[in-house]
Amino acid sequence: MRTLKVSLAILATTAITAPAFAQELELPIVEEPLELTIHMHWPRAQGYGPGGDTSTLYPVEEAVREITNIHLVDQTSGRNTTDNNEAMNLLIATGDLPDIVGGNLIKQPVNQYGPEGAFVPLGDLIEEHAPNIKAFFDARPELWNALQAHDGNVYYIPYLPDGKYGRAWFIRQDWLDKLGLEQPQNVEELHEVLVAFRDRDSNGNGQKDEVPFFARDWEEVIRLVTLWDARSSGSDTYHDFYVTDDGQVAHPYAQEAYRDALANVAQWYEEDLIDPEIFTRGSSSRDFLLGENLGGVTHDWFASTSGYNDALGDDIEGFNFIPFLPPASAGGVRMEEHRRTPIKPDGWAITFSNEHPVETVKYFDFFFSEYGALLANFGVEGKSWDMVDGEPIYKEEVLTSDTPVNSQMYLEGAQIYRGYPQDYRYEWQWTSQPAREGIELYDQHDLLVEQFLGVSFNKEEQAIYDRYWPSLRTYMLERQQAWILGSGDVREDWDAYVEALNDMGYEEVIEVMNSAYRRQYDG
C-alpha cells in the first residue's frame, strides 16, 4: 500500500493562498475495487457523469478510482427534472437510497431525514477516519455549527467556496471621462452621475437611449436599498433572512429601513434612472445593454463583468467598464452586501443503506487532501493543468478556449457539487486584470457584512416554516415589484403591509427562525 501526503486547505480570506500540509493518508483506501452508488443532481448535470451522461466517466472520477480504488456508480433519481428539490423528494419517496446522496441543496432534506435515520451522522466517523476534514472544521468551528441538524449531528460534507468577494459595483469610466465626472463616492453623487448618464448623451449617438442603472438579475435592483441603510439579504442568496445587530434573525423586507429605502428606489425608477425593463429583460441584459453601448452602472460578478472590456474593446471605442467602491449610504456607510458564502447547502452525505461508511468517509476525506483538492478544483494534472513552481496552472488551451473555464471544469468532473474545499486559485487565473485590481481595491476597505449561514429546523419548526413562509415570500416580492413600478406607495401602504405579513404568519416564522438559531449557534 502506498502513502500519499495530503494537505488541509484552510481557506484563507485572501485569494491565491496555497493549502498548508496536514497529515498523511494510506492510499488506496481499499485493496480491492469497491463500488458505491451515488445520486448526484445539480443544475449542470442530472446524473454522475459529464452533462449527466452516465455512460461516460468524468476524467476526475477515472483518476480518483485509480488512486483510491473506490468506484462511484450512478444511481440518480429525477433525471427528467432540473428541479433539485423535486429530484430529492422523488429519491426519498422511493425509500431505495444509494450509498451516497449528493448535489445541490441537500442540506435541508438531509438534516430533516438524518435524525429520522435516513442518513449517517458523521461526527465520530470524521473524528476517527477523516483527519483532513477534521482539521478543516477544527480551524473553522463556526462552519461546523452551521452544518448541524437540530439534533446536534452533522449529516453532510458541504461544498466550501473560497474567496471573499463575489459581486461589485461597475461603472462606465469612459462615460465619466467624457462628461468630466468623478466616480461617485456616495448615494447623492451616484444619483447625479446616473442623471448625467441619462441626459448628456453619454454614448454620443445623439439619442436619449442610455440606461443609467441596469442588472441582469432583477434582484440587484433591490440591492439598491443598501444605499439608504437597509438590507436586501443576509447571505449570498437573494431575499434571505439576516441577523440584526442585537443578534436576532429578521427578514429585511419587514423592516422600516426597507420601507424608506424602497421608496427611494421607486423614485429612481420613476426618474428613468433604472432600466425600465429591469424585471423582464432577463439574463441577457448585460450582453445587450453593454454590447449596444447603452448601459452605465451595474452590480455584478467581478470576474465575468470585467471580461467585457476585452470582449467589446474593439467594437466600442474607449469602452472601459470597471469596478468602483460601493458609494457611501445615506448614513455614511460603505457596504458590500454580497460576498461569497463560506459554506453551501450543497455537498454529499452517507445513507443508512451504505454498508461501507468508514471507506466512504475516507473517500470524502480524500477530497480535502492536497491532491484530492487539486483534482476537485482543477481537473486531472497533465490534462487541464500542470504544476509550475508549486502552483497549479491551467494549460493555455483551457484559458484561451471559447468555452468558459468553469464550464470546461464541469465536464472534467471538477467544480461539481461534491463536498470539497474550493481553491480560489482556480478562478484567479481567468480573472481579468481590471477585476483583480477591483478585488484588491475592495480588499483595502472594511466593506463586507457578516453572513447568515442558515438554520436547521426540528420537525415542528419545519412544519411552521413550510406552512407560512412560501406565501409570505411570494407576497413580499409581489408588493416589492409593484411599489417599484409605481403601483401603490410603500410608505402609504406600509401599515397595511405589515398587518398582512403578521396575518400570514410572519411572527410565527421569525419565532421558529430564532429558536433554531439560538439552539444551533448559542449552545
Image (cartoon, grey):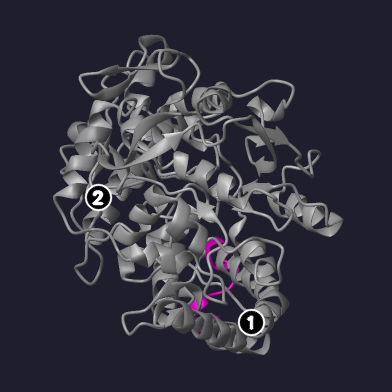
Left or right relative to 250: residue 326: left
Circle 1 SS class: helix
C-alpha separation, residue under disc 1 versus residue under disc 2: 34 Å
Horizontal and vertical percent position of residue 392:
31, 24
Residue at 36% from the left image edge and 11% from the top image edge: 396
**Residue 201 position (above or below residue 90):** above
Left or right relative to 181: residue 72: right
Magenta span dominant secondary structure: helix
**Is residue 183 visible in the rendered structure shown here?**
no
**Residue 20 position (above or below residue 492):** above
Horizontal and vertical percent position of residue 361:
54, 49
Mark 2 — residue?
Answer: 13
- The label shown at residue 461 is 1
Q: Residues within 10 Å of mark 1 (few under 14, many from 20)?
A: some
- What span is colored magenta in the figure? 483-493
**Residue nearest the observer in this picture, 16 or 489:** 16
Left or right relative to 499: residue 159: left
Left or right relative to 53: residue 435: left
Decide whether residue 293 is among the magenta residues.
Answer: no
